[in-house]
Amino acid sequence: MSRADDIERIRTGLQAAARALKPFTPGDIEFERKEHRGGDPVTEADLVVDRVLREALPTDGEAWLSEESADDRVRLSSRRVWVVDPIDGTREFVEGIPEWCVSVGLLEDGEPVAGGIYNPATDELMLGSKETGVTYNGREAGLSDPGDLSAVSVLASRSETRRGEWKRFEGAPFQVRPCGSVAYKLALVSVGRVEATFTLVPKHEWDVVAGVALVLAAGGVVTHADGSAVRFNQEKPLLPNLVAAGPRTSAELLSSWLND
């Protein structure tokens, strides 16, 4: 199977997810609180999209990891693993803020090799792999990587910003812009709509695999805040933090602001 086939499967899965979401209205939807993960909201839409993507994506010999499915440990010995967040940014989805998305990523031997992210609220589709490059609504796209931090915008977690966790960057030369879904933030970096994003609190693999695949496909760099490599398909799929940007911008952020 070629990488182009993988991208087409991701596209088809995201299209099916978009159709499944049509009956739901962002900002006017019932939700429950999960007993774990800090009481994060979950809606019927999350569960419907999870089922749709699971039917569309894995084939024989491929494993599955999703926020809304029980963790099947067979993934740890599988070469190809689909990593999915049916709705990343459910808080924004519930509140009617257009910063949520459907996120589909593919790991091969623990490496993010292909990804697709669709934001139904803005009708933005980002697809990519190292072999095919990255597209934004069907057009070739790429990073914005000025290196000079005064020309850099960094997308920050809306939740982290509300909690005051980004106050230490008030004197930074780069502009900080709050945004919801981390998958969406990574996708926007990959297509040059913004220069960088980084997280200050742990994120699950399903939050970021698709976006990381897109950033890498665009020639970007994704590391932890100390500059170390990120490893995926771990027994506990939780990452302490992430930094994503073009090579020059990443180097400046790591040396000046993140690698204390």
Image: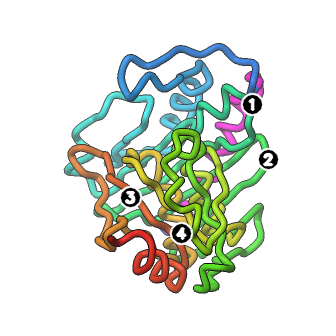
Nearer the observer: mark 1 or 2; the answer is 1
Labelled disc at residue 96: 1
Nearer the observer: mark 1 or 3; the answer is 1
Labelled disc at residue 122: 2
In x, y percent, where is residue 244?
49, 68
Among numbered discs 3 and 2, the one appearing first in the sequence: 3
For mark 3, give the secondary structure: strand
The kind of residue on which mark 2 rests is: Thr
Asked if 228 appears above or below 80 in the picture, the reply is below
The kind of residue on which mark 1 rests is: Gly
Among numbered discs 1 and 2, the one appearing first in the sequence: 1
In x, y percent, where is residue 255?
40, 80
Among numbered discs 4 and 1, the one appearing first in the sequence: 1
The one of 24 and 97 positioned closer to us in this rendering: 97
| CB atoms of marks 4 and 2 within 8 Å | no
Count of marks, rendered view? 4
Q: How far apart are the alpha carbons under marks 1 and 2?
A: 12 Å
| CB atoms of marks 1 and 2 within 8 Å | no
Among numbered discs 3 and 4, the one appearing first in the sequence: 3
Snapshot quadrant of residue 44: top right
Residue range highlighted in magenta: 3-25
Q: How far apart are the alpha carbons under marks 4 and 1?
A: 27 Å
The one of 56 and 224 positioned closer to us in this rendering: 224
Q: Residue at x 37, y 41 (%)?
A: 65
The kind of residue on which mark 4 rests is: Val
Residue indicated by mark 3: 107
| CB atoms of marks 1 and 3 within 8 Å | no
Labelled disc at residue 206: none
